[in-house]
Image: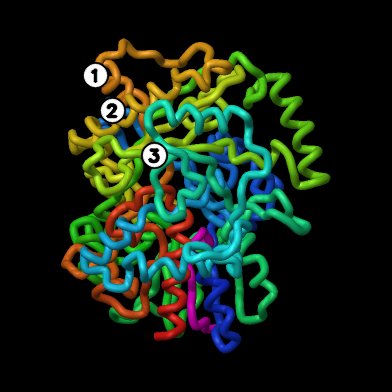
């Protein structure tokens, strides 16, 4: 069979594309996903996310590692990425954040016509069903369930109070008229019906309801190996499943939605990229495109954790696990209670310099101890706070290790390669540290993990020793109009035909916030462009 569209990657973008394109009954759509079905209890139950993110074992998670990072004292960073229908929306903490409107106006100023805030807002609204109701900034008719948290912990509200002590005002809607301030996050979670309290991944929102359509074929456990070209036109995708080699043909387009690591990797495996990178692995060149795999950006994140004097937070110990188990029974019966927690319940956006026109720092407050992405277990009750730099200047790369599609991509974020990133992140960390020792958190505050001597040098050394990603890699197939752009503003790959990239890799510059909602928006807009083209 020849499909009209073959989509590679069933993550946040791929699920949206498959659902929206197959709304037209005259189109035949095929979606390839390397992972599984995305509907297991581990994915559906929000509180079980910790079992997947750690990557020990690798459950619905690629659990990539970076190359050694000189800026992080030679440490290899950890890069969890979702491997199931829903992609990283199946293993994230469900936060619904769009970034700042200036982010998108900045894209337009870089030549990405049609991607300014006023252009993308309708697609954010189209995607969401927000329980707060419809207004100028929010929608109620979309597939993605966006809701307030069911049962936030008392300490999360205390964090919001603590933010006032460092002059961060309250904000009840980070996606509202202003981003700056402290508050509780909205989450992508079902708020009612038979799935009440479950994670609303992109698969649950978009793809699963669409899979009953006769014109949509979804193939899981399918590892794409390359895009097939006739000349410079993409005509299909080769993939492996259960040790067997297969080819699926595309009559109109192949669309890569494999993410900031997978999409540039597949382009290079297919002969599209910098000649030096491709030829040295014995791959036949199709198109010289030097920007493939360049411009990788991510939010570097520094975490401080405390033991808690109180037990009304998360603890990986007999008492804490018993509480969690009882909460799980309640969730199973009612869809309510502590088992619905995203753990990252509260947060804040703030500016380190009042002269800045938008926040440059974000805080994520967690109701448990997070040490090395939960890979180093702490068996105490406690809590943590993350600070991340929203507009990093450092840029990294994604390349291939060999011509073997099963080989992991070579990921080099080049964290802190621009010295100003360390200076700015340290400034943000100072604000976070002051917040965490303020009076509203005193009832919980016990011993701090990894204390430093208080000096600037001590703090910067601690950042180099402990900072890592907060899971927002983007930019490696950059959209633009210059010679280093990989895709044009229609998301068509330059230098070839019949091929697009639609995922977070197309962002020319990282947004000032979490990246799942923007990725869904990108796919909504792309589907509209494709269907109207």
Looking at the image, is mark 3 or mark 1 earlier in the sequence?
3
- Is 125 within the magenta? no
Disc 2 target residue:
426
Residue at screen point 53% across, 16% down: 442
**What are the residue bounds of the magenta stretch?**
1-13
Disc 3 target residue:
362
| Residue 319 vertical position relative to residue 10 in the rendered view, above or below | above
Which quadrant does the C terminus fall into? bottom left
Q: Nearer the viewer, residue 248 or 209?
A: 209
Residue at screen point 43% across, 32% down: 386
Tell me residue 64's x, y (percent). Answer: 43, 42
Q: How far separated are the C-alphas under marks 2 and 3?
A: 13 Å
- Is 9 within the magenta? yes
- Furthest residue in direction bottom, as rendered: 26
SS at badge 1: helix
SS at badge 3: strand
């Amino acid at each position: 069979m020849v499909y009209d569209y073959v989509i590679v990657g069933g993550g946040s973008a791929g699920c949206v594309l498959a659902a929206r394109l197959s709304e037209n009954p005259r189109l035949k759509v095929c979606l390839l996903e390397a992972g599984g079905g995305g509907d297991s209890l581990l994915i559906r139950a929000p509180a079980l996310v910790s079992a997947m993110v750690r990557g020990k074992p690798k459950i619905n998670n690629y659990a990539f590692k970076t190359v050694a990072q000189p800026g992080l004292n030679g440490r290899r960073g950890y890069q969890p990425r979702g491997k199931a229908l829903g992609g990283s929306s199946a293993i994230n903490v469900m936060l619904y954040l769009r970034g700042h409107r200036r982010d998108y106006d900045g894209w337009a100023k870089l030549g990405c016509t049609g991607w300014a805030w006023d252009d993308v807002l309708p697609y954010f609204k189209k995607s969401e069903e927000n329980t707060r109701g419809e207004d100028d900034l929010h929608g109620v008719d979309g597939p993605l369930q966006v809701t307030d948290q069911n049962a936030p912990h008392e300490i999360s509200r205390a964090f919001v109070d603590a933010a006032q002590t460092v002059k961060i005002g309250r904000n009840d809607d980070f996606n509202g008229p202003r981003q700056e301030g402290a508050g509780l996050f909205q989450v992508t979670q079902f708020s009612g019906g038979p799935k009440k309290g479950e994670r609303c991944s992109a698969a649950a929102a978009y793809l699963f309801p669409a899979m009953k359509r006769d014109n949509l074929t979804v193939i899981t456990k399918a590892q794409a190996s390359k895009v097939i070209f006739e000349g410079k036109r993409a005509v299909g995708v080769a993939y492996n499943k259960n040790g067997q080699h297969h080819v699926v043909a595309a009559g109109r387009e192949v669309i890569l939605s494999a993410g900031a690591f997978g999409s540039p990797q597949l382009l290079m495996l297919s002969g599209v990229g910098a000649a030096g990178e491709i030829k040295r692995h014995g791959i036949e060149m199709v198109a010289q495109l030097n920007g493939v795999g360049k411009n990788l950006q991510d939010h570097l994140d520094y975490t401080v954790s405390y033991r808690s004097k109180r037990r009304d937070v998360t603890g990986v110990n007999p008492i804490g696990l018993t509480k969690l188990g009882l909460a799980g029974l309640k969730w199973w019966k009612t869809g309510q209670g502590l088992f619905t927690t995203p753990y990252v319940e509260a947060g804040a956006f703030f500016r380190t310099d009042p002269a800045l026109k938008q926040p440059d720092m974000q805080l994520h407050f967690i109701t448990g101890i997070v040490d090395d992405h939960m890979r180093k277990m702490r068996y105490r009750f406690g809590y943590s706070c993350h600070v991340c730099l929203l507009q990093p200047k450092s840029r990294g790369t994604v390349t291939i290790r060999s011509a073997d599609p099963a080989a992991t991509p070579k990921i080099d974020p080049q964290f802190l390669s621009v010295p100003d990133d360390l200076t700015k992140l340290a400034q943000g960390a100072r604000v976070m540290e002051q917040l965490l020792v303020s009076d509203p958190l005193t009832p919980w505050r016990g011993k701090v993990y990894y204390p430093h001597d208080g000096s600037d040098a001590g703090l910067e050394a601690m950042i180099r020793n402990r900072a890592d990603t907060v899971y927002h890699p983007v930019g490696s197939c950059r959209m633009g109009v210059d010679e280093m752009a990989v895709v044009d503003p229609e998301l068509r790959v330059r230098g070839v035909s019949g091929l697009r990239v639609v995922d977070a890799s197309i962002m020319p510059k990282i947004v000032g916030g979490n990246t799942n909602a923007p990725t869904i928006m990108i796919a909504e807009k792309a589907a509209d462009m494709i269907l109207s083209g």
